Image (spheres, grey):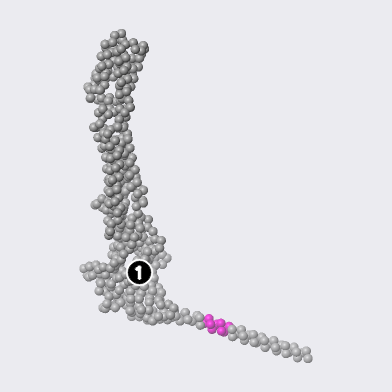
Amino acid sequence: MSSSRNKLRLIFDLLLLLLSIRCCTVTSQSFNSSNYVTDIRPTKTRHNVSLLLDKLLDNYNHHLRPDIGGPPTFVDVDIMVRSMGPVSEADMTFSLDCYFRQTWRDTRLAHQQVSKSDDQLSLSVSMLDRIWKPDTYFYNGKNSYLHTITTPNKLVRLFPDGRILYSSRLTIKASCPMELRKFPMDVQLCPLNMGSFAYTQSEAIYRWNKDRQIVIASGMKMSQFDLVSAPVSNYTISFKHGNHSMISVRFHLHRHMGSFLIQVYGPCILLVVLSWVSFWLNREATADRVSLGVTTVLTMTFLGLEARANLPKVTYPTALDHFIFLSFGFIFATIVQFAFVHYFTKNGFGELYFSDMTMDDEDDEQLDSSDEGFPSARHTPSPTVARKKKIHPREEVYSVENHLRNMKAEETAIVQIQPDDGSSPSQRRGKKTNQRKAQQWDGKAMNSVSKIDKISRIFFPVLFIAINLFYWYTYATPTSE
């Protein structure tokens, strides 16, 4: 009885084992079949694209443009500017880094849409060597190149209707004819002209994309300029072999004034104001006023040469040149002004001549000779009287300091000879004369101010401010283009 039960249990276990194996087999087959279906679809799509490209390029001649012998091929262009600069005034050039996009239609590459989800085919860069592409060149370009790190920065898209999008990243250096008459308050118009090098207007026509022409990257900044606008235009240029279709964009660049105010305009104004300090120096300080004028002139000359170091040698003066010439002229005028002061107003204004001293010295000598009882004073002439007899009147100017020093020496000699005060009327008269001379050369006479200096203190600043107002109004006012 027990043996029969064991047999039944064994049979039941075997049935359960067979059932579980069967279920696992069905599950694995269904999983493998689903994977097969998922993998076969991309393989089939890739196979279809390869067959499609082979079929499109079969008997395709990439040396001939689309619709040759028929209507011209239209090439739509748009540019996305990533960065601009530098802009060089010395070379009259500008540079920009951009995505240069071209779109044209080639009916030979029209096809049915391969996938409902994708309406375009992303092709390899090597496909550019197997299809026709426009021979675009930059008419005013100088040194442009394609970015090739890490691979050539190119993009090719093929649409079902035969349209081809070709985009590349370029750095373009082009010439910019600049008008520098208002430098550094100028606005420059830097053009970028492009078109076909070989195809005439009857074969290829360039035009700007209707949806977008020039796109400026957000956050783009330039160190010396502000990009105000970038208008576009189409035109035709004539060559010997025919007319060519061209398109152009003009970048409006407005220059910053900050660096020039700090480096040129500010120092020039300070030098002019510094030269006016000589108006407050007395006319006897000849060395101080001349050295101040020469120093400011030399500094102004160096500043003017440094400001023009990075500018082209144009045939006309710029606004910066006018301001430097203006500042140089005011500094030079202060030196000429002192020459007028020194030549025309030195007589009787802070300068002492021998003729003025001779009359007083002769009166003192007559008074001294008439006195009796002081032979030492009568026979010992003063240094001033001794030198007076050898010099003709008004042939040499006698300095104020030496004259005062001699008067003090005479007073000391008189005191040593006559220690008794008021012993003689003639000596009292001599002392009064010396005191009168000391008072005559004291005060304003010792530090005289010329009327020309007084007028210059007002005239020079007022004239400089008036000319500056006219200068800034003329050059800083924007003009309509």
Question: Which residue is pictured at 64% across the width and 85% down the height?
Answer: 20
- On screen, residue 58 above or below 332: below
Please identify the quadrant where the C terminus is shown. Answer: bottom left
Mark 1, residue position: 212
- The image quadrant of residue 123 is bottom left
In magenta, the rendered stretch is 28-36
Mark 1 surroundings: few (<14), some (14-19) or many (≥20) residues within 10 A: few
Question: Which residue is pictured at 47% across the width and 81% down the height?
Answer: 41
Provide residue 302's location: percent of width, then percent of height: 31, 44
Could one spot residue 392 in this view of the protein? yes
Q: In terms of secondary structure, where does tag 1 sit?
A: loop
Depth check: 72 or 334 in front? 334
Instruction: Count the marks.
Output: 1
Provide residue 345's location: percent of width, then percent of height: 25, 31
Question: Which residue is pictured at 34% across the width and 68% down the height?
Answer: 213
Question: Which residue is pictured at 25% across the width and 17% down the height?
Answer: 362
Provide residue 148's location: percent of width, then percent of height: 39, 65
- The image quadrant of residue 360 is top left
Specify the amino acid type for callout 1: Arg
- On screen, residue 95 above or below 240: above
- 34 drawn magenta: yes
**In the image as oriented, which residue stretches furthest toward the top?**
373
**In the image as oriented, which residue stretches furthest toward the left?**
240
- The image quadrant of residue 14 is bottom right
Please identify the quadrant where the N terminus is shown. Answer: bottom right
Could one spot residue 197 in this view of the protein? no
- 270 drawn magenta: no
Provide residue 119's location: percent of width, then percent of height: 41, 77
Q: Main secondary structure of the magenta part?
A: helix
Depth check: 162 or 17 in front? 162
